[in-house]
Amino acid sequence: MQEAMINKAKQLLADGTVSRVIGWKRGEFAYDITPAVFETAEELDKEFVYDDFTAANVSKYLVKESKKEGKILVFLKPCDTYSFNQLTKEHRVVRENVYIVGIPGGPKLDAEKIKAKGITGILSVKNENYTLKIDTVYGEEKMPFYEAVLDKCASCKSKKHVVYDELMGEEGDVLDSNRFDMVEKLENMAAQERYDFWREQLSKCIRCNACRNVCPACTCEKCVFDNPDSGVENKAPADSFEENMFHIIRAFHVAGRCTDCGECSRVCPQNIPLHLLNRKFIKDINSLYGEYQAGEDTTSRAPLNDYKQNDCEASVVHERGVE
Ligand code: SF4
Ligand code: SF4
Ligand code: SF4
């Protein structure tokens, strides 16, 4: 796949369709694949990477990149196309300045799950018939591929691209996903148990802002958390109130716009399952206003921006709160 993508990028650069390419290159470690912009065939040959660890959704980078001179090529996995559509709908990317090549998705791997098996000093990881052969400084290790799959891929909602100019490979389908299972488990907990679950999770937060910075739904020019007068500007939370506040405010800011791309949880260095907060919102929006998938298209009105006479009454919030 990597070679085919490099060839496609070179062809689109050579025929003038695009002037640059956003993709990925290797970082410090074999599993550390990071977004990068390429302008020449030589750069692509030297650094462009697409492998089992290429999970990063580059849609958000297009907020800035699509406003620059010339058209940019982007390779989008199915999940990433939902983010792109949502950004288009919110007029955050300039659609006509982007050439989208849809590529098949994952499942992608999570290096943290490999390390959690006690495997460290990783030099390289090879997938051989769905067994991972991991070369480490201490020798070779093996583990089943599916035990290292990213959570977002394990509960993937769709292998179908919702936007592209050109497709590489076969188109997939919207999946009958198990993504709300954990949300239901949390809903079935007693209130105190649920509170304790989230307190334990959120108490680990170091306010690195990675979840905010990676989220394609978090694109405000001025974020409330960057306000120097707020007292909470870019700092580690001082107490449990601040720990909760950051996440509750962020979750509400992306309510109805979160595409469930799972990037927030993927990048959290503390492994906090942040996507579960927004999945709860998605589930509630579906049950209160009818099925809705943010990013599925660029024209439908989002439930929270729309009004229908048969919408549920506002009192439902109060009633649910005392359940
Ligand atoms: S979330 Fe789904 S579409 Fe996206 S990379 Fe994972 S498996 Fe592929
Ligand atoms: S990425 Fe994780 S640790 Fe960083 S601010 Fe978000 S929740 Fe906190
Ligand atoms: S809140 Fe998380 S899952 Fe939702 S759009 Fe942002 S990064 Fe993706």
Image: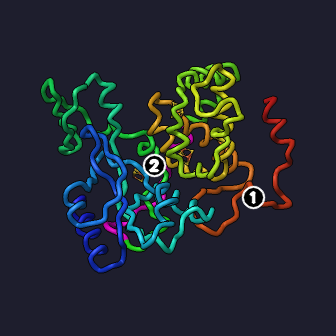
Q: Is residue 136 above or below residue 86?
A: above
Q: Is residue 4 left or right of residue 193?
A: left
Between 52 and 23, the one nearer to me in the picture:
23
Between 320 and 103, the one nearer to me in the picture:
103
The residue at which mark 2 appears reads as 156
Residue 260: give x, y in percent of width and height: 54, 48
- Residue sticking out furthest to the front: 228
Reading the chain from its start, which is encountered first: label 1 or label 2?
A: 2
Q: What is the quadrant of the C terminus in the image?
A: top right
Q: Main secondary structure of the magenta part?
A: loop
Q: Is residue 162 above or below residue 292?
A: below
Q: In this picture, which residue range is highlighted in magenta? A: 167-181
Q: Is residue 107 left or right of residue 254?
A: left
Residue 317: give x, y in percent of width and height: 81, 39
Q: For residue 47, what is the image quadrant? A: bottom left
Q: Dot 2: within a 10 Å radius of its alpha carbon, few (fewer than 14), some, or many (20 or more) residues?
A: many
- Please tell me which residue is depicted at 61% across the width and 65% down the height of the picture: 91
Between 232 and 5, the one nearer to me in the picture:
232
- Please tell me which residue is depicted at 70% across the width and 55% down the height of the picture: 290
**SS under mark 2:** loop
Q: What is the quadrant of the N terminus in the image?
A: bottom left
The residue at which mark 1 appears reads as 305
- Check residue 173 for magenta coloring: yes
- Please tell me which residue is depicted at 42% across the width and 73% down the height of the picture: 70
- Residue sticking out furthest to the bottom: 15
Residue 275: give x, y in percent of width and height: 55, 40
- Check residue 317 for magenta coloring: no
**SS under mark 1:** helix
